[in-house]
Amino acid sequence: MTESAEHQFLSECVTRVLSQLSHTNLYAYVEAERRKFDFACELVRDWSRPLVGQTLWNHTAGIDKDLRTMMLDSDAEICAYVARDTVKARRLLSEVMKDFHTSGISVAPHRLRVFWVPQDFDADDEAQRDLVAELLRDSVSRDILMNVVFGNIAPEDVRFFVRASGLAGLHLALLHAISTAREPYSQVKDLAVQFGVSVGAIRERLLRLFGCGFLTQFGGGATLAKATLKGRVFLDLCGELQRQAAAGHLTAEMLQILRLLEMRYAPSAVQMATDSLHLAGPLLAEVPEMVTGRLIATITVAAQRWGIGFETIDHMLWEDEEPLESRGSGTRAIIDRLRRESDLYSL
């Protein structure tokens, strides 16, 4: 059966969004064989997440088949469904998911990500194409990237992080040290010796990093910590932001990521943030430009005062986190390798 113009446009739109935002180097986008799906790819961020997707436009009765095809695919970690927004379509989708639940079949319903498109969308209208593309760009990047691939990093996490005062940049340097440590958990006293500060200073900043969700704590008598997926994503975001800010230009893809984190870039705010970096308080993190400015200023201080390098961050992944490759493989190295293989494949 011939696909409608709307069907083709919507399928291409989702993969285009995911492909373009991979230019931030925060993850890699790799095309995959479509098989029985309308679109398919792999999103690589520390480990690979296969994504399969279906698009529904004219044939509402196909919802049952579409969902079963995706949800019963044991290899798919993300199931993206782009559908025409009608009452009938929503009702059928709800009924199918209830059937899965009552049948006892293990399908992990959290894998399903549904993106509704206005039912009167006309792909022959350029203005409507632009509008729907922007709607999907926002919803796909927010739901699939921010909530899944990036470990559910949120604007509140970044704001809480940049409100820190005192020894500027120490909390970022601490996160970097723990994420790249050759041991799965780092002890407070060892970190205090490494940075030449008191145990109290380390504990205070560990609490902030725990509060951001950038670290996870392991029980026991001593405070032990390791970086979470969210924490590793944040570090890589800092590295990419530092590179682009130093070049004096932020790409459209980076600006989109910042927008999703309710941040905005303004060079003038960086100097203001640098001058007030020793201060703390919620008011300093309420203005989106100041959030970005304080983060850039913090990155600069961490590099200058604590000797932290952001060019290549060699995150350590552990067995309980299902690493993509052997331990010690940094995300940027994985991305570079996949891109080389992709280039060879396309020849």
Image: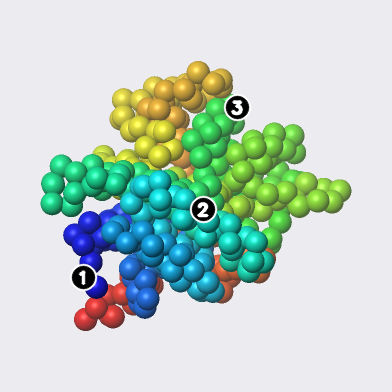
Q: Is residue 253 above or below residue 46?
A: above
Q: Which callout, 3 or 2, points at the residue further toward the start of the chain? A: 2
Q: Determine contact: label 3, label 2, CB under 8 Å.
A: no
Categorize mark 2 by other alpha carbons within 10 Å: few (<14), some (14-19), many (20+).
few
- The residue beneath circle 2 is 94
Q: Amino acid at mark 3?
A: Gly
Along the horizontal axis of the image, is 162 left or right of 36? right
Q: Which callout, 1 or 3, points at the residue further toward the start of the chain? A: 1
Q: CA distance from mark 3 to mark 2?
A: 52 Å
- The residue beneath circle 1 is 2
Along the horizontal axis of the image, is 177 left or right of 116? right
Query: What residue do we see at 21% from left, 81% from top?
Result: 347
Q: Is residue 333 above or below residue 268?
A: below
> Residue placed farthest to the right in the image?
221
Along the horizontal axis of the image, is 237 left or right of 15? right
Give x and y (percent) for residue 119.
29, 47
Q: CA distance from mark 2 to mark 1?
A: 27 Å
Categorize mark 1 by other alpha carbons within 10 Å: few (<14), some (14-19), many (20+).
few
As drawn, the label of residue 166 is: 3
As drawn, the label of residue 308 is: none
Give x and y (percent) for residue 110.
56, 56
Viewer-side residue, 165 vs 78: 78
Viewer-side residue, 35 vs 16: 35
